[in-house]
Amino acid sequence: MSGQIDEGLRSELQRQGIWVTSMQDLYNWGRRSSIWPLQFGLACCAIEMIATAASRYDLARFGGEIFRPSPRQADLMIVAGTVTKKMAPQIVRLYNQMPDPKYVISMGACAISGGPFKQGYNVLKGIDRYIPVDVYIPGCPPRPEALLHAFMELQRKIDGQKLTGDNRAEHLNPAQPSEFPVPAFGAHDLEPPANPDVFEPPKIERT
Amino acid sequence: MDIMTPDPYFFIIIFVGVALVFPLLPLALAWLWRRFFQPPKPGAEKNAIYECGVESLGEAQVQFRSQYYLYCIIFLIFDVEAIFLVPFAVAFTGLPVGAFIAILVFLLLLIEGLVWAWSKGCLNWAK
């Protein structure tokens, strides 16, 4: 849809004061300008997330200041902190309860891989084992600037999502699931330890 | 009636029309959007009523005993009594006899209430 008008022509028209847009651009512009995160924090990264939302760093400049206390109203899940195995089912359940389109930012080393607690018996080795993650932020904890950067990256991703066609956004594709299985507490670990549909263990390449 | 001045109720009709279109238009647009672009993806988790991440336990229709309510009311009475008694005690030396009698009557009323509640068995925690 956005491919119907030449980019050069569009910028030329813009210079003359004529704005041409498509439904896809309008849709993506609206979505990326009001990403409402889910209001929850897990560990020390949450403090940085709070700082990002507060006045000094001011996430409101990017349209993401409205932290929703209910998953029904949230677009974005910021997994800010260590995900313990006790907490993982709740996070997956909250993600399942968010309406589409929904995005996940995995904030900090713990949410990515377990971080400094990776060897811990009770720590999940990355939230991407159960839910699809859109943006990863390294750091322990990442500074608010890093979260803002991740937010801008997510906005860039939303901007590039297609409305129709084979490579359209996941939430527009009926074949893509919106809910993912919630892990159960097993005897020694969560069962299953990872969702094979979303998680692929990293392959070790020996040279 | 003059043709140029509309009926006074005409504005009410306009108001009702706007009040109907204002919420229905976004709903209709959302419905159209769902129809053409976004496939609905309902599910058991997504449609669950409870939304804090934890599965709900038991039923919603549980009964609470009224015992605590009585206890609470009696506590409230004596809480208010303390609010009145502290300023009275602070200003005790400078008060006339009438004030002393008034506070005694106030205390008597509360004690009477306490005796009544006691005799009713409100202070016993019924098992």
Image (cartoon, coloured by chain):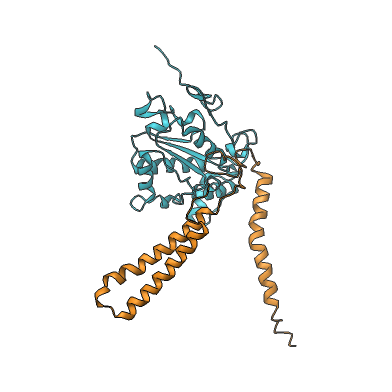
Chain colours: A cyan, B orange
Q: Residue A167: image x %, image y %? A: 59, 34
When the figure is inspected, residue A74 is found, relative to residue A206, above or below; the finding is below
What residue lies at 36% left-to-right and 69% top-to-bottom? B84
B49 or A39: nearer the eye?
Answer: B49
Residue at the farthest top position: A207
When the figure is inspected, residue A39 is found, relative to residue A140, above or below; the finding is below
- Quarter in which the C terminus of chain A is drawn: top left
Residue at the farthest left position: B93
When the figure is inspected, residue A166 is found, relative to residue B119, above or below; the finding is above
Q: Residue A202: image x %, image y %? A: 45, 21
A88 or A144: nearer the eye?
Answer: A88
What residue lies at 62% left-to-right and 47% top-to-bottom? B61
Horizontal side of residue A17 vs A53, given as left or right:
right
Q: Residue A73: image x %, image y %? A: 54, 48
Horizontal side of residue A158 vs A116, given as left or right:
right
What residue lies at 65% left-to-right and 36% top-to-bottom? A174
